[in-house]
């Protein structure tokens, strides 16, 4: 798998989140935004929360854990990260 960017991402340190069952609840930076992630998005979010992840690493984890092919995983990861970035829920690690 190859992505245009080898950047790594992690949850913004200013947000709060909690995983309950297969879903994750995220409270945005402003404190007024609440985001509910489904089981697949929650799986990916928890990987990001453990350590910074590149798109390729997330896509490999997605194909290993779910019945998804490589191309679909890459597309899903790109969309997932773009949504998180647009909502200011993830950042690049300092020094990256």
Image: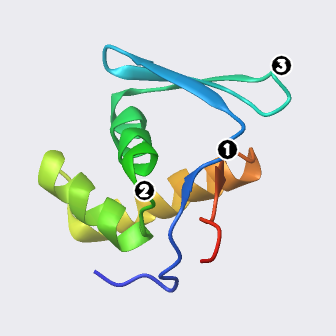
Q: Residues within 10 Å of mark 2 (few under 14, many from 20)?
A: some
Q: Earlier in the sequence, mark 3 or mark 2?
A: 3
Q: Which residue is mark 1?
A: 89
Query: Which residue sits at x=74%, y=30%?
Result: 28
Q: Earlier in the sequence, mark 3 or mark 1?
A: 3
Q: Secondary structure at mark 2?
A: helix
Query: Which residue sits at x=38%, y=67%?
Result: 74
Query: Which residue sits at x=43%, y=69%?
Result: 54
Spatial CA distance of label 1 from label 2 is: 17 Å
Whether the residues at callouts 3 and 1 have beta carbons within 8 Å, the answer is no
Q: Is residue 72 visible?
A: no
Spatial CA distance of label 3 from label 2 is: 27 Å
Residue 18 drawn above or below residue 39: above
Residue farthest top in this picture: 20
Q: Which residue is mark 3?
A: 32
Residue farthest front in this picture: 95
Tell which of 73 and 15 is nearer to you: 15
Residue 6: percent from left, percent from top: 47, 82
Q: Secondary structure at mark 1?
A: loop
Q: Which residue is mark 2?
A: 76
* Position of residue 89 in the picture relative to residue 25 (left or right): right
């Amino acid at each position: 798998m190859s992505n245009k960017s080898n950047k790594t991402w992690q949850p913004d340190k200013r947000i709060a989140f909690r995983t309950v069952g297969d879903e994750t609840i995220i409270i945005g930076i402003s404190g007024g935004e609440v985001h509910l992630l489904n089981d697949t998005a929650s799986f990916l979010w928890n990987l990001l929360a453990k350590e910074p992840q590149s798109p390729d690493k997330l896509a490999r984890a997605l194909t290993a854990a779910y019945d998804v092919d490589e191309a679909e995983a890459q597309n899903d990861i790109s969309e997932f990260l773009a949504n998180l970035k647009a909502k200011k829920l993830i950042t690049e690690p300092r020094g990256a």
